[in-house]
Image (cartoon, rainbow, N blue to C red):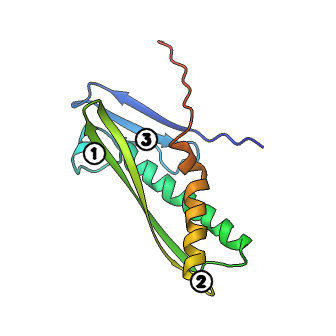
Amino acid sequence: MKINRTGSAHWEGGLKDGKGTVSTQSGALKDHPYGFNTRFDDKPGTNPEELLGAAHAGCFTMALSNILGEAGLTAESMDTSAKVNFEKLDSGYAITSVHLDLKAKVPGADPAKFEELATKAKLNCPVSKLFNAQITMSAKLV
């Protein structure tokens, strides 16, 4: 089974004076603003790093829910944040790491087993795998 989901971006202008919007196929985001000032300053709007963080936190938490279920456990609650580190390197800007911070209530879970299951989810959720994925592209001028 193959599922396709789409996110899109629109941009006008230069890097620092330009502005853009991002949208999702589902409509959860519709023409949501982003730009240099939302990425490098704390202006209202979003940026690619926080969107990746939300996607990673959501994917990891869903994967862990599945893995817990396979182990006969059910979470009462799980809260995950993903801190995406975006740094300027000698070679240019790069996302250098992501730190997942999970706080969970899982009745009957042994701490060591829970750590093992969470590690399995971290390694195997599709967004974790994306950070090492092949990226393809098509580009054309219109």
The amino acid marked with disc number 2 is Asp
- The mark closer to the camera, 3 or 2, is 2
Of callouts 2 and 1, which one flags the residue occurring earlier in the amino acid sequence? 1
Between the C-alphas of marks 1 and 3, the distance is 14 Å
Which class describes the residues within 10 Å of circle 1: few (<14), some (14-19), or many (20+)?
Answer: some
The amino acid marked with disc number 1 is Thr
**Residue beneath disc 3:** 31
Q: Against 125, is 138 above or below? A: above
Secondary structure of the residue carrying tag 2 is loop
Q: Against 22, is 11 above or below? A: above
Q: Position of residue 4 (x, y in %)?
A: 66, 39
The amino acid marked with disc number 3 is Asp
Residue, x 29% and y 29% (percent of image)? Answer: 91
Quarter-wise, where is residue 72 in the image? bottom right
**Residue beneath disc 2:** 110
Secondary structure of the residue carrying tag 1 is helix
